[in-house]
Image (spheres, grey):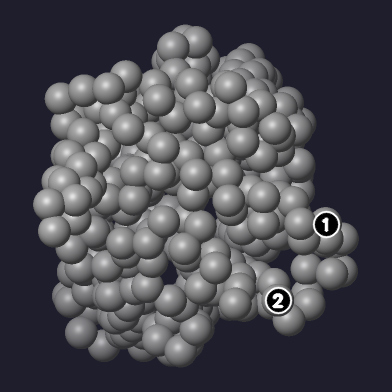
Amino acid sequence: MEEEMREALMREEKKESNGSDDGQPWMVYFSTFVAVCGSYEFGACTGYSSPVQDAIIKDLNLTLSEYSLFGSILTFGAMIGAITSGPIADFIGRKGAMRMSSASCIAGWLVIYFSKGPWPLDIGRLATGYGMGVFSYVVPVFVAEIAPTDLRGRLTTLNQFMIATAASMSYILGTVISWRALALAGLVPCAILLFGLFFIPESPRWLAKIGRENDFLASLQKLRGKNADISDEAQEIQDYITTLDGLPKPKLLELFQTRYLRSLTIGIGLMVCQQFGGINGICFYVSSIFELAGFPSSIGNVTYAILQIVITGIGASLIDKAGRKPLLLVSGSGLTVACTITAIAFYFKVHEVFLEAVPTLAATGLLIFPINIKGRAGSIATLTNWFGAWLCSYTFNFLMSWSYYGTFFVYAAINALTVLFIIVVVPETTGRSLEQLQASINK
């Protein structure tokens, strides 16, 4: 009996000490902060095209189709980044992939800043898109791999919070500074990230995967604190890596086998639902939507930006309490309602019904929009995400030319299907380690 009590006390002590010397995993927080500077860069890239549209078109004498290409080519670059993101992150590590992404974004912003015509502008936008595509994969993977189970939800949600914050800041800054100055502002998060990478450890799970056992243990110890007992967590990671090593390495077509099919379906399905719901069209061209609805674009941009930060912050604070699946359902339902309201607003305008209500309805619809596997599978899912983003952002202006309200009714229908997909297919992940989650999905 005494021995059982002693073991229980030891287990409790492990739980209390697991994380860091004083119960606060400061290195996990610091490493997350450095990594999500990549997420901020992501948001800066996506938010750039909306507030500068009129200024760039005027300064460089661009046509609407030329500017649509400039806005959407970002996501084409991100598709290229998505194809290479998994192999790069597996080959040179998560930190190496983030360094490469930063370099691509820095080069892209400088080209945009010095652009005198559409071609340099597009090349710069393509380069920032490539960096974005890699960031979109490697940042959440890195954060998930360094975080303890009880913090993983909140810390990975910081990725979305930083994207929303950066996009919102771009909307706000774009109303007061020139488009060239806004391009230079995109260099700041990259500089912070590159500097911070010198002080944070590499992902312990990646180090374990490539067989660098001493580095793996040192990294995990640094993340959890020098006095933390990491034996149980290290053993769980090692056991999972050993199990993976015993499995055949899947080729591209083999990813569609039954054992991997559910993971792939969830990953690709969520990406398709997210992008075809219209969010990138909204983010890229929110200024022009407000103008079309007769709502002051400067006021709309700032209000939209502030609400995105608030909504994403609330989501980040609730994710571990409410769970990811309920928040996905709330987000999908909100998108459906938002698109429907905006569609009704434009329907009224086109048919000259309740014209005095159109600006308010359109603004209401837009302002409640939330911003919402690894290796080859991760690349496929990320590629799907960015292909959808490119298709949405490129076709948005053309769809609006076809029908203002029809565009948003289409988006509303897609978002309604998203809610159904989440209910039927997507599992809850709260409270599970990465290894437990993968085991439950692929069993």
**Which of 64 and 140 lies nearest the eye of the viewer?**
140
Q: Against 341, is 206 above or below?
A: above
Where is residue 134, by image quadrant?
A: top right
Residue under label 1: 249
Secondary structure at badge 2 equals: helix
For label 2, the crowd category at 10 Å Cα-Cα, with few meaning under 14, some 14 to 19 and many 20 or more, is few
Neighbor class of circle 1 (other Cα within 10 Å; few <14, some 14-19, many 20+) is: few
Which residue carries the number 2 mark? 259
Q: Quadrant of residue 181?
A: top left
Residue 255: image quadrant is: bottom right
Q: Position of residue 153 (x, y in %)?
A: 32, 53
Residue at the spot x=19%, y=51% of the render? 3
Q: Is residue 291 left or right of residue 247?
A: left
Residue at left offset 31%, top offset 62%: 431
Q: Secondary structure at mark 1?
A: loop
The percent position of residue 279, horizontal first and vertical second, equals 45, 63
Query: What distance separates the C-alpha of mark 1 from that of mark 2?
Result: 13 Å
Query: Which quadrant is the N terminus positioned in?
Result: bottom left
